[in-house]
């Protein structure tokens, strides 16, 4: 794993620019044996050109065989050991919408879901209801009284919301209530140690009243909670790397993890890859490191939509000229994890990586950007947390180590 103390010691000032483009859930699997993955099926002439001029490889977010959540997968991309820095999704989502989560507060990410007459989940995402439809539902959940804490609830995006409890003795070591499958009822919140039992009881009290208020809804008539957590006090990105970092992302989760490490989150209009790349261009002179997050590759993978995921990768490729026009010194294109549409969920498979750095890269024999060629690429397979030192080196921002 990357050594943050070493990065602090070796950082070297320079005017070079680094761009990390993350297509969430980029890695995939063939639809049938011997066929292409979603990335390989996509028509991506610009990324293929970058692959020919650059070098390919694979990254492993947490460890071999370990399926990562989005939080640890992104922290790894920023060079943080995802085992050492274990950050819950709740605090990441809350930070993403600007909620102040103090040490001792309890945050959780909520999903509206659909349950049948027996209380069993039939849709874990309530039909992916829109943000506009979620807002009045969240309003229904405001003001739920608790004996020993104050509850705040805010819309995140689509079917997601943020729950924040403020009060004493709110230990976050609580079992998630999402069974991660249909045909089962939402699980109760369970404190995993004595210190967490009080907070778990408050959560269950809140959920019981929330369920009562949602009972008449046609789709979002129940909810689940994930990622119970509090402020992690992470080391900050800028002092570690000597870079002035910025985040361009549509979804709160990824804005949140960026805020937690001290990145500037750029606000912009629009949601398309072209809109995101244009926002980078507008702020190009103000920062020297840009993290760009693209979400729909992951959502389409979770929906099992192979053709849709491939088509969206093509949309990213069509827009990527907007980034190339800015002449970054280092451009890395990858994902935080794999989300094969065949599996409809995150997976443990290594993630394809393309590194383009025209002044310093040692090219391999790649002719296209895809899993098969990445598996034999010149960078090999390595931990995601090692990508930051590699990008820093190609940007000529690291001093020599030792005499």
Image: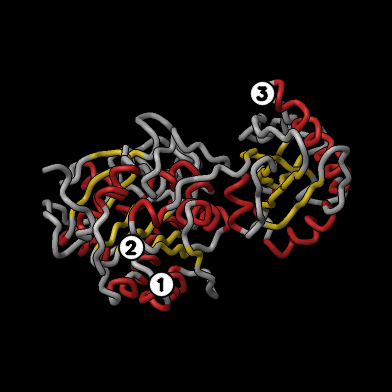
* Label 2 crowd (10 A; few <14 / some 14-19 / many >=20): many
Mark 3 neighbour density, 10 Å: few (under 14) some (14–19) many (20 or more)? some
Is disc 3 in contact with disc 2, using a CB cutoff of under 8 Å?
Answer: no
x and y percentages locating residue 37 in the rendered image: 34, 47
Q: Where residue 192 is drawn, which disc sits there?
A: 3
Q: Who's the residue at 86% across and 45% down the image?
A: 215
Q: Earlier in the sequence, mark 3 or mark 1?
A: 3
| Spatial separation of the CA atoms under disc 3 and disc 2 | 40 Å
x%, y% of residue 141? 82, 51
Disc on the earlier residue, 3 or 2: 2
How is this picture coloured? secondary structure
105 with respect to 22 (left or right): right
The numbered disc on residue 280 is: 1
Looking at the image, which residue sits at the far front? 403
Query: Do labels 1 and 2 touch, CB within 8 Å?
Result: yes
Q: Which residue is labeled 2 in the image?
A: 19
Residue 188 in view: yes
> What is the distance, in whole Å, between disc 3 and disc 1 at their CAs?
43 Å
CA gap, disc 1 and disc 2: 9 Å
Looking at the rendered structure, the secondary structure element under dot 2 is strand
Question: Can you say which quadrant of the picture contains the C terminus?
Answer: top left
Q: Quadrant of the N terminus?
A: top left
Taking the spot 53% from the left edge, 73% from the top edge, the residue there is 268
Residue 402 lies, in percent from the top left, at: 15, 42
């Amino acid at each position: 794993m990357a050594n943050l103390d070493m990065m602090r010691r070796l950082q070297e000032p320079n005017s070079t620019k680094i761009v990390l483009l993350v297509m969430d859930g980029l890695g995939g699997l063939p639809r049938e044996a011997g066929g292409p993955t979603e990335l390989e099926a996509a028509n991506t002439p610009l990324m293929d050109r970058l692959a020919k001029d650059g070098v390919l490889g694979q990254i492993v977010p947490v460890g071999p065989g370990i399926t990562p959540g989005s939080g640890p997968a992104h922290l790894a991309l920023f060079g943080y050991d995802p085992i050492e820095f274990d950050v819950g999704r709740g605090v990441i989502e809350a930070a993403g919408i600007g909620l102040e989560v103090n040490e001792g507060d309890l945050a959780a990410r909520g999903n509206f879901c659909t349950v049948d007459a027996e209380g069993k989940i039939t849709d874990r995402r309530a039909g992916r209801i829109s943000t506009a439809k979620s807002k009045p539902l969240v309003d229904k959940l405001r003001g739920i009284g608790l004996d020993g804490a104050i509850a705040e609830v805010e819309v995140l995006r689509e079917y997601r919301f943020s729950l924040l409890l403020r009060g004493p003795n709110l230990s976050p070591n609580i079992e998630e209530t999402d069974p991660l499958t249909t045909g089962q009822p939402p699980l109760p919140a369970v404190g995993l140690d004595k210190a967490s039992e009080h907070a778990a009881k408050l959560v269950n009290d809140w959920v019981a009243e929330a369920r009562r208020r949602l009972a008449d809804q046609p789709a979002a008539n129940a909810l689940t909670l994930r990622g119970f957590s509090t402020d992690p006090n992470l080391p900050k990105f800028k002092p570690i790397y000597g870079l002035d970092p910025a985040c361009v992302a549509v979804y709160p989760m990824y804005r949140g993890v960026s805020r937690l490490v001290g990145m500037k989150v750029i606000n912009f209009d629009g949601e398309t890859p072209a809109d995101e790349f244009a926002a980078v261009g507008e702020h190009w002179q103000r920062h020297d490191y840009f993290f760009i997050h693209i979400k729909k590759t992951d959502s389409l993978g979770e929906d099992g939509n192979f053709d849709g995921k491939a088509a969206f990768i093509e949309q990213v490729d069509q827009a990527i000229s907007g980034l190339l026009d800015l002449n970054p010194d280092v451009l890395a294109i990858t994902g935080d994890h794999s989300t094969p549409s065949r599996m409809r969920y995150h997976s443990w498979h290594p993630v394809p990586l393309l590194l383009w750095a025209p002044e310093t890269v040692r090219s391999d024999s790649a002719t296209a950007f895809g899993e098969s060629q990445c598996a034999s690429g010149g960078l090999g397979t390595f931990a995601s947390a090692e990508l930051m030192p590699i990008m820093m080196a190609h940007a000529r921002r690291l001093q020599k180590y030792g005499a």
